[in-house]
Each structure stands twice: as C-alpha cells, then as structure tokens.
Amino acid sequence: MSITAARVIVCSPGRNFVTLKIETSDGLTGVGDATLNGRELAVAAYLTEHVVPLLIGRDPARIEDTWQYLYKGAYWRRGPVTMTAIAAVDTALWDLKGKMAGLPVYQLLGGRSRSGVTVYGHANGSSLDALLSSVAGFVDRGYRAVRIQAAIPDISEIYGVTSAAIYEPASAAIPAESVWSTEHYLAHIPSVFARVREEFGPALRLLHDVHHRLTPIEAARLGKSLEPYALTWLEDPVPAELPDGYRLIRQHTTTPLAVGEVFNSIWDCERLIREQLIDYVRATVVHAGGLTHLRRIFDLAALHHVRTGSHGATDLSPVCMSAALHLDLAVPNFGLQEYMPHAPETDEVFPHGYRYEDGYLHAAETPGLGVDIDEAAVRAADAKGHAWRNPVWRYEDGSFAEW
Ligand code: GCO
Ligand code: MG
C-alpha cells in the first residue's frame, strides 16, 4: 500500500481550521488536524509546499519512520509551524493504521487504562452570580471538574470571560486591544474561589488559567492565596521559557501547576518534568508532533509523577480531540482533558463518534480515530476568510502584556 494523495483543507465553520487528508492506493483515508490558531496559513503552506510532495508513494504503515524523516529531514528542528505540520501527518497515519487493523487507535496504543476520559468544562461569568450559575450548569450536566474564569472589577475585557455561548477570542479583523491590571486581578481572584468553594463544597475539582500573565513572585503569591480552596491546577501562571520561574513558584506554594499548551516538543518541557517543577503537562496532539511525539512526552512525565492535562480549546479541531481521547484512554498517567464543545457548524464539518456522558468523554469504537471531514459541508460553511488573529492586551501604561 502507498500514499497516493495528501490534501490540505482550510475552512472556517465558525472558526478557522486546517486539516490534512491522506489517501492510499487501497482507497483508505486518514485525517490529521493542522490548526495553529492565528498562524493557520503558515502551516497550510508548510504542508502543501514542503511535506505533501514527500508523502506521495510512501508506505503509510511506517509512522515512526515518517516522523523521523519529516523531523530530522527538515534540518530546522522544532517550532510550532513545523511540529503542527508533522502532527497532522502523524495523526492521519495513526487514523489509517487503525483503519488497516480494523481497530480504534487506543487499542494500538496499548488498550484502555480507564473506562472514560474525565474532562473539565469552562465556567465563566461577567458577574459573580453569572459565574456561580455557569458552574451550577456544569455540575448539573455531570462535570466533575470546572475551570473558573471571572470578570475582574476595573478590567473591562479579560481572557476566558464571555456572555456568548461559545468563547471565541480570535477574529478575521485586526485584533482589538484591551487593558490588563495585575493589581486588580490579584486582589480579586481569591474571593471568587472562596465563593465558589462555599457554594459547591470540597469535591468539585476547580481549575484556573492565568494565561501566562504574571511574574514568578506574583504567581507564588496567587498560588499561596488560593491554597485554602484546593485547586486541581493553576495553569500557565508565567511563561514557561524559563523553567527556574517555576522553581520559584514551587518554593512558595502547594497549589498544583499545569503548563504546556504552547509547547511543541519534549525539549520544551524536559526540565520542567524531570525536576518535578510542574504537576500536569498540557501539550496536545496537534501542536506537539502528533500521537507519536506526545506519547513520548507523556511517558517521560509518567516517570516523574507528572500527569497529563491536554489542551482542548475550540481552536483545536474535532480531529485533534478524537486523537487526544485515544491517547488519554491508553496512558497510565492521564490527569484531565480540557473539553470545550465545538460550535454546531464545526461539528457538522467534522462528523465524529466521540461523545460526552456524565463528566466523561468516550472515544469512538470504530476503526481509526472515528472522525472525518465532510467536504460538502466545508464548502457550505466556508465563508469567513482564512487569516484569523488573536486578541492583544496592554498594561495600563500602554506596554505590551500577555494575552
Ligand atoms: C486554554 C487556552 C486557550 C488558548 C487558545 C489559544 O486553556 O484552553 O488557554 O483558550 O488561549 O487555545 O489559541
Ligand atoms: Mg490555557
């Protein structure tokens, strides 16, 4: 069997996605997510110009060898664009291998380690009452873990808080700029968690995403002030380029730390994991080199008591979510999976067999990943343009802040 075609499909069913579809001489197809939010077209061009010509004629069964060929063969290693492109190929080849074997991919990864994948949902609110009713909605729907993002007095826009049904910060327009104040944020957040704990008791797992905005000593203070509310994790408290920042936070607080949605290789997190500076690694299939490479990261993490907590925002397509679920089912050190349901128009373009039930996601039992791209639906949905941009925040004095 050989690869006869590989097509890059860019479409915007509600938001922007890039998908690679590989076809074989036996008439099988495999899909891989190649979406890099805000830089989508760079990956599309990387695939079309530099990767697809190398795939034609190759044996689709040689997943590891193809990974090495694309990674080492590029000479220029790592980086989000390269690793997302490699991930798309790798994911599509795992999908194909499952179809060739007649097995769901988790069976090829060693079989089930658990009966379902525990997910966390995104509660938020523009007032405390709105936040509490959003949390209650998740609890009613059976969620065991909920991420809490709250409006902050005197900050008009903040990451993760929306009145819309689906949070979508990216847009086709030049990004809006909003103002950030660390002082207002640090002064307010502990009272939010105090209220949520009071209302929902000790069993609900609570998480919070700082979105890289603090310095290590500010994050240490936040972690310490949240200790009474026993968070499952505090996410991205500071940018992770400097692992020593995490050592400083660790010296001051027992609040668990989760990092890694922007990581694209094992070398981004090797030291954080090896020195046990984090508790959860949030790397994903689509941005960290596919199932082949993410499995390597998760295995390293397992040696060092670090659990998995893969990124699962709506700017990762249902193809990535399907692949993540197969890995989540198989690895021994699974922690949590982020789950933001996609818009109905996205689900229409990517028909999939995974389903949510009572706090868990369940992967499809069909051969492969159990997801496809419906190209007729792509044409109908594809109206919003393909160059999307992420929002921008600045400190009160006008200098650039992390989103
Ligand atoms: C999360 C993330 C996302 C990112 C987005 C960037 O924890 O889900 O922080 O909301 O901001 O995926 O493209
Ligand atoms: Mg995050």
Image (tube, rainbow, N blue to C red):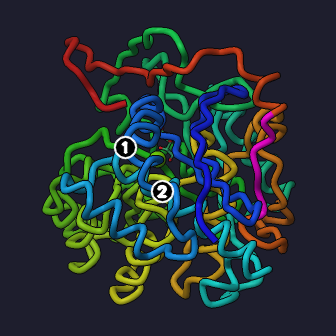
Q: Residue at x 47, y 32 (%)?
A: 40
Rendered view: 363 above or below 276: above
Instruction: Pinpoint residue 84: horizontal percent, then vertical percent.
Output: 43, 50
**Magenta stretch holds residue 371:** yes
Q: Residue at x 18, y 62 (%)?
A: 243
Q: Label 2 vs label 1: CA separation?
A: 10 Å
Observer-nearest residue: 210 or 328? Answer: 328
Left or right? Give the position of 389 relative to 262.
right
Q: Residue at x 39, y 32 (%)?
A: 42
**Magenta stretch holds residue 134:** no
Occupied quadrant, residue 313: top right
Left or right? Give the position of 273 relative to 45.
left
Most frequent secondary structure within the magenta stretch: loop
Q: Which mark is residue 55?
A: 2
Left or right? Give the position of 254 relative to 4.
left
For label 1, the residue is 50
Observer-nearest residue: 403 or 315? Answer: 315
Mark 1 residue type = His
Does the beta carbon at disc 1 come under 8 Å from ligand 1? Answer: no
Q: Secondary structure at mark 2?
A: helix
Crowd band around label 1 with a 10 angstrom C-alpha radius: few (<14), some (14–19), many (20+): some
Q: Is residue 179 visible?
A: yes
Observer-nearest residue: 68 or 149? Answer: 68
Left or right? Give the position of 113 relative to 249.
right
Residue stretch in magenta? 370-375
